[in-house]
Amino acid sequence: MPGQSAHTAPMIAPSILAADFARLADEVAAIKGSDWVHVDVMDNHFVPNLTLGLPVVESLLKVTDIPMDCHLMIDDPGRWAPPYAEAGAHNVTFHAEATDDPRAVARDIRAAGAKAGLAIKPGTPVDPYLEILRDFDTLLVMSVEPGFGGQKFIAEVLPKVGIVRRLVDAGELTVLVEIDGGISADTIEAAAEAGVDCFVAGSAVYGADDPGRAVSALRAQAAAAASHFAP
Ligand code: DX5
Ligand code: ZN
C-alpha cells in the first residue's frame, strides 16, 4: 500500500523459558499486552535440555488469553506437534531438522486448528525450504543454537530474514517472520531492519524489573528501526 510499511506493527513474544517456573500463571500475567507468549518445549533429544510439555501448555492455556506460540524443539514432531494445536495453541512451530516431511506436519497442525511454523537452526539455510513455506504461516529463524536462554545473538542469520522478507513483500509468500534468541535492546534494531515481524525475547523481558514495560520498550524500538526501512 503506498506510504505504508509492507508489514504490520512489530510483535513481541516473551519466552517463559526465562520466567519462574513455579509461578508461571503470574509470570504470564506480568506480560499482559504481549502479542504472543512463547513456550519452549524441549525433549532432551533434539536439544540437550528438558523443559515442559503438553500438560503444562494445557494448564497455561486456561489462565491466559494471550495467543500461545509453542516452539517445539523435539524429535518426531509428526507425532507430538498436532496435540498442541488441538489443545488450543495459536501457533505451533517445529524444527525443519527434526523431520523428513515438514509439509505433512504443517498440514496436520493446521487441520488441528493452529497456525503452523517452521523453525531453522542458525546453521540451516533457508533456501531449500522457500518452496514449502507456502504451506506454513510462520518461519522462526533461530539466532542462537536452540536449547538455552540467555545466549549471544548470532547476527549472521539476518540475511535469511532478508531473503524471506523480500519474498513476502513481493507477494510470493505470506509467512510471518519470527526471530528467536539473544533479542534485547542491543540487537532488536538490527533484526527489525532485516525485516522481522515477531521478536521472541526471554531474558530481556523476564530479566527486567518490569517485564510489561520491557515488552513495550522493545516493541517501540523495533517499530522505530523498521520505519527507517519502510518502502
Ligand atoms: C532457545 C529458546 C528461546 C529462548 C530465548 O532455545 O528457543 O526461545 O528462550 O531466550 P533469550 O531471549 O534469553 O535468548
Ligand atoms: Zn524458542
Image (cartoon, rainbow, N blue to C red):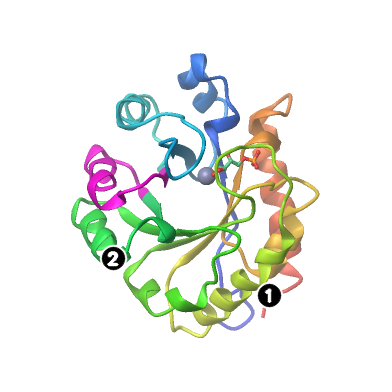
State whether label 1 is within 8 Å of ligand 1: no
Mark before the other along the chain sequence, 2 or 1: 2
Judge the density around disc 2: few (<14), some (14-19), many (≥20) Cα neighbours within 10 Å.
few
Picture layout, residue 72 above or below residue 56: below
Residue found at the very far right of the displayed protein: 186
Check contact, mark 2 vs mark 1: CB within 8 A: no
Quarter of the image with the N terminus is bottom right
Task: Judge by depth and name the residue closer to the eye, 4 or 151.
Answer: 151
Residue 148 lies left or right of residue 26; in this view the side is right
| Residue found 43% across the figure and 59% down from its top | 97
Q: Which residue is mark 2?
A: 101
Picture layout, residue 132 above or below residue 219: below
Quarter of the image with the C terminus is bottom right
Q: Which residue is mark 1?
A: 230
Looking at numbered disc 2 in the image, what kind of residue is underneath it? Asp
Range shown magenta: 69-91
Spot occupied by residue 100 in the image (x, y as percentages of width and height):
31, 64
Callout 1: helix, strand or loop?
Answer: loop
Residue 96 occupies quadrant? bottom left
Callout 2: helix, strand or loop?
Answer: loop
Residue 199 lies left or right of residue 115; in this view the side is right
